[in-house]
Amino acid sequence: MNRRELFKSGSAAALVSVLPASLASQAVRAEISDAAPTSEVRDVRSLDKGWRFFEGDIPFPTPIGNAETYDSTKTGAAGGAANLNFDDTEWPTVQLPHDFVSFQPIEKSRNVAQGFRKRGIGWYRNLLRFEDSDRGKHIEIQLDGIATNATIWFNGTVVRHSFSGYTSSYIDVTAFATYGDTPNSLDIRVDAQSMEGWWYEGGGLYRHAWVVTRNPVHIITDGVYGFPVKTNSGWHIPVEVTLYNIDHTDAPVELISELKDGSGAVLKSARATATVPSLRHAVATFGLDYDAPNLWSVDQPNLYTIHTKVMQNGKLIDEHTYETGFRTTRWDADKGLFLNNQPIKVQGVCVHQDHAGVGVAVPDSLWAYRLKRLKELGVNAIRSAHNAPNKHVLKLADRMGFLIMDENRLFNPSPTYMEQLQWMVRRDRNHPCVYLWSVFNEEPMQGTPQGYEMVRRMREAVRELDTNRPVTAAINGGMFEPVNVTQAVDVVGFNYQQDKYDAFHKANPTIPLYSSEDTSAFMTRGEYVSDREGRHVIASYDDEAAPWGETHLAAWKAIDERPWIAGGFVWTGFDYHGEPTPLSWPANSSVFGIMDLCGFEKAAFYMHQSQWVKDRPVLWLIPHWNWKAGETVRVVACTNCEAVELFVNGKSAGKQPRTKYEMNTWYVPFAPGRIEAVGYTDGKAVSRTKVETTSDPVRLKVTPERETIQGDGIDVITFRIESQDAKGRYSQFSQDHCTFEITNGEIIGLGNGDSNASEAEKGNRRKLFNGLAQVIVRSTEGSTGQMSLTAKADGLKAAVATVKINAAKPWPYQTVSAPVQPIPVLAIAPATSTPPVEIPRNLDPLKIELWGRIYPGFINEGPSEDSYQLAVVDWTPYTRVQKQGGKLIFPKIKGKVQAFVDGKLIAEKTTEAESPFEAKLPPGMGERNLGLLFKVKAGETFGLAEKAWVATL
């Protein structure tokens, strides 16, 4: 029985298999949530701090001499900014997540699809310190996302090439790591000129980074797979645990998995044994049974915890915990999708991963804000378009109740890209929110035999790892060709094929169908008269859509009236940077969104809410009520009530039964005052709303999205800036320039939802757009008390809002170092019986090639007679050291030695024993000369027992 059949059958038998050592650990921390997880046996530390960043490329030096060329080809000898001995002392420091493209100005000469922002290349460098207690442990660096292509060096050696901005890099650096006082250099060149998509993709280390330290025998991260399966007799969780062993001997272990409820009580447990060979992987498979769980659904997202422990000789050596849920999905070609045997219509949106002010570097709590807005809208499903999402989004979706269509980026079954697809499945397959695996989006080969064969292989790669969810694809053509991709997927998704729903269903009555992407309608928030050429705005009545799409109302009608279409995904939930179709310069962001870039609702929000929300009355009126006297105004009510009546200045304009797919509309002459709507159900008034004529703005209002923020230096909060008239009503026509002042926090981004805005999204100034703006603030680490944001604008009364700061522990952070400069390899002159008269400088390269070397970290053999051994090097200290001076640090040096700088004695070590040695380096510009004069007894060893460096002051 293979792994797939074992999981499919729900067998509880224990199975152990050994995997080849060449299979790299697909590891990433499973729990990214409120804080980094703590464990006595597994240390997970954030690597979001300590980064030094350079915008632009740095050329690699071209070696000339024989010795230089020879040395440059060796492990640890990377050149340029990847070299250990590279000066980054004057680079600015940045904190992750970081999108360097979001800092760029908007320029007409740049790529329109990327929001007219320069992408380019950037470098990130960090120095990590590992303690002596970490020796012998498994150390892994995890980079959650780098946009776009990247090369990663660790201690001067290439350890990873990343070919996608949406997959993570998990790097075992155990073999390269140094410990104690010797720092480890982590250097990353990011090429954001390479594009994977036709939308704003940002650039840089835009997701979190981590250092995970585990015992020699451990569970690989992503190494526990256990998703509940419904059987005839109840529920079964087939658990698969993948282990790895870096120890020198095979390791017998015992595994214990426990199912826990929300209170932490153990409901069921199971055990298995395994032997993990040295430097190999092993997989143990066993199972947990549970009869009566509370099911996970979009309305009641009940979660359980699976806690797996690894025991060796009765001692806990590793553990892993993740949340999951019990739920079933069933697809019916005639009736659509069933969740837990209950029919559910997918009310979905496609979502790109950028936000106003921060680009793609979206903090976790800003994602929570975005998903909360979608929940208010009535969304029950999200399509990650068109890439694997931030893993925190999946954690939030599990907890908040969203279905996730998890999408692969590139359509390619070759090994590199298949690894990306399988990485996504491994990472995400325990999440109850994930209900579909999508292998591609809109590929030209979808209607060809080649495309069919490609999908067939990608589907099997998914099924090798997970059989609980169907494989799908977002298809926009070729579905009626004799051989096409619809024949290779489990569930068919259509992009913008509303006119083909009926024909395809008739021709393929056994294939489940849904809309993977639809609508592509245009709206500008707060605008109700289109002006594409002048002001570059589009009215919000839902009259205009892309040629390939439909309006919001028409697209949903086509889906909702057909029970065999399981639902759909609107393009898009939010506006996004780039792709400003159908507008032209200066428009630089899309206008497809149900909400704008800030998450402020457009009219489409109310339209969909009236169709999607079932548990409460919904009633909204559009447009505003500021028009010219006598002008006929189109008034639209968005409601889920059975009937709605419009009143204009207290007089009824007519009562209408609800029109679900078209909205209720009246054409009435404008007169200053107000319009009011009353919603009726069962003949009773159940909801009221009104819109009033407002006057010019006189003041600002600042509203935080919530009342508290965590003072951990990680949490962020959004503030809504609003203009108001003298009666405190939202005055939507204000375009005033605002400035902002923050206490106990840092402004990390600004926005206003204007697709034409070219202002910087950083700093403390932002113009209101139609009366609104947004300020995104990150807390200060270690802060308590209150955070306050003040908004000011000329001619308007200033406003201030305060938020309580809760005392909170920051994530545990990896210990990092300020820049240090490794002391380079020294040339060692032939031994002499007397000390040299002077320390030579500017040595002839040919002479150096004939001399020996003193390599930091290696001990040299001693001479046959008592003698002096001179080691010398010309080198240029880091810029800050040149200006301020520094310190020569030798953690362990063997032998009596004198240190000379520029021919002057600066320090002396008088003992022969291996011990630390330090010397103060005086300031001085340009190249310096370092000489180490060893006095060595016959037969005694000498040299630098560990790497040495120059530290900045």
Image (cartoon, rainbow, N blue to C red):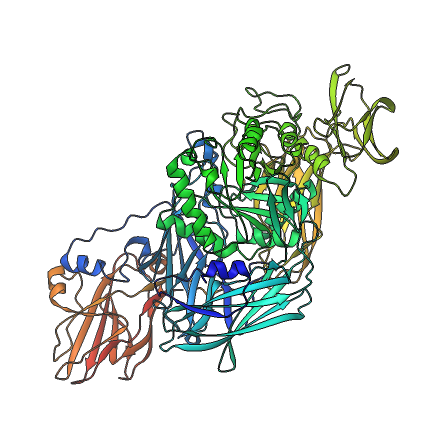
Nearer to us in this view, 572 or 804:
572
Q: Is residue 282 left or right of residue 679?
A: left
Nearer to us in this view, 765 or 334:
334
Q: Is residue 410 left or right of residue 908?
A: right
**Would you identify the image quadrant in which residue 566 lies?**
top right
**Would you identify the image quadrant in which residue 766 lies?**
top right
* x and y percentages locating residue 18 in the rendered image: 39, 68
How many marks do you count on the picture? 0
Nearer to us in this view, 47 or 236:
236
Tell me which residue sits at (40%, 38%) in the image: 451
In the rendered image, the quadrant that contains the C terminus is bottom left
* x and y percentages locating residue 827 in the rendered image: 18, 67
* x and y percentages locating residue 158 in the rendered image: 32, 57
* x and y percentages locating residue 590 in the rendered image: 54, 32
Q: Is residue 778 left or right of residue 194?
A: right
Q: Is residue 243 above or below residue 878?
A: below
Q: Is residue 915 visible?
A: yes
Q: Is residue 840 above or below residue 755?
A: below
Tell me which residue sits at (29%, 48%) in the image: 59
Q: Is residue 755 visible?
A: no
Nearer to us in this view, 939 or 224:
224
Residue placed furthest toward the top: 630
**Would you identify the image quadrant in which residue 630 lies?**
top right
